[in-house]
Image (spheres, rainbow, N blue to C red):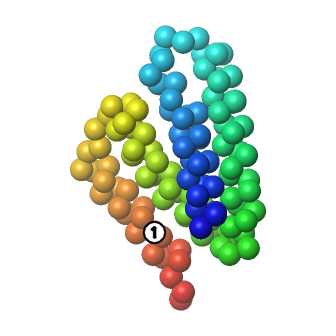
Amino acid sequence: MRTIILLTVSNIFMTAAWYGHLRFKASPLPKVILISWLIAFAEYCFQVPANRIGSYQFTTAQLKTIQEVITLIVFCVFSIVYLKEEIKWNYIIGFLMMIGAVFFIFKKW
């Protein structure tokens, strides 16, 4: 569970670093890049331990899959709450298909 919590916190920081500046389009690009890098540093402080801890329990493919599912969830919440964007039905279908990949990654064959 520590891995999932750390990955979630990491993804919140990364989503903010990658997309948070979109509400401030008038800000100078060098300033936005610097702030994004500072936020990304905080993301790495959670991502690296999450992967290290998780590597004892999950394969790297499983870790990446967990991270991608968390990313989709965090991104959906962020885009609705912070960016005030709509989630359309085709986005949901696409996300569900990606989550379906989790079945194949974690299934013991």
Across and down, in percent, residue 80 comes to 34, 38
Q: Residue at x 47, y 70 (%)?
A: 102
Q: Is residue 4 above or below residue 40?
A: below
- Decide if residue 8 is on the left or right side of residue 58: left
Q: Most extreme residue toward the bottom, as rendered?
A: 109
Q: Residue furthest left?
A: 89
Count of number-bearing discs? 1
Q: Residue at x 64, y 63 (%)?
A: 3
Residue 105, placed above or below residue 98: below
Residue 7, given in percent of the width and then of the height, sits at 60, 55
Q: Which residue is mark 1?
A: 101
Amino acid residing under circle 1:
Ala
What residue sits 46% from the left and 48% below the top? 74
Quadrant containing the N terminus is bottom right
Residue 27 place in picture, x, y as percent: 54, 12
The percent position of residue 6, horizontal first and vertical second, equals 63, 55
The answer to whether 94 appears left or right of 11 in the picture is left
79 relative to 8 in the view: left or right: left
Residue 10 sits above or below residue 49 on the image: above
Instruction: Say which element carries label 1.
Output: helix
Residue at 63% across / 28% down in the picture? 36
Among the 4 quarters of the image, the one containing residue 44: top right
Instruction: Say few, some or many: other residues with alpha carbon within 10 Å of mark 1 (under 14 / 14 to 19 / 20 or more).
Output: some
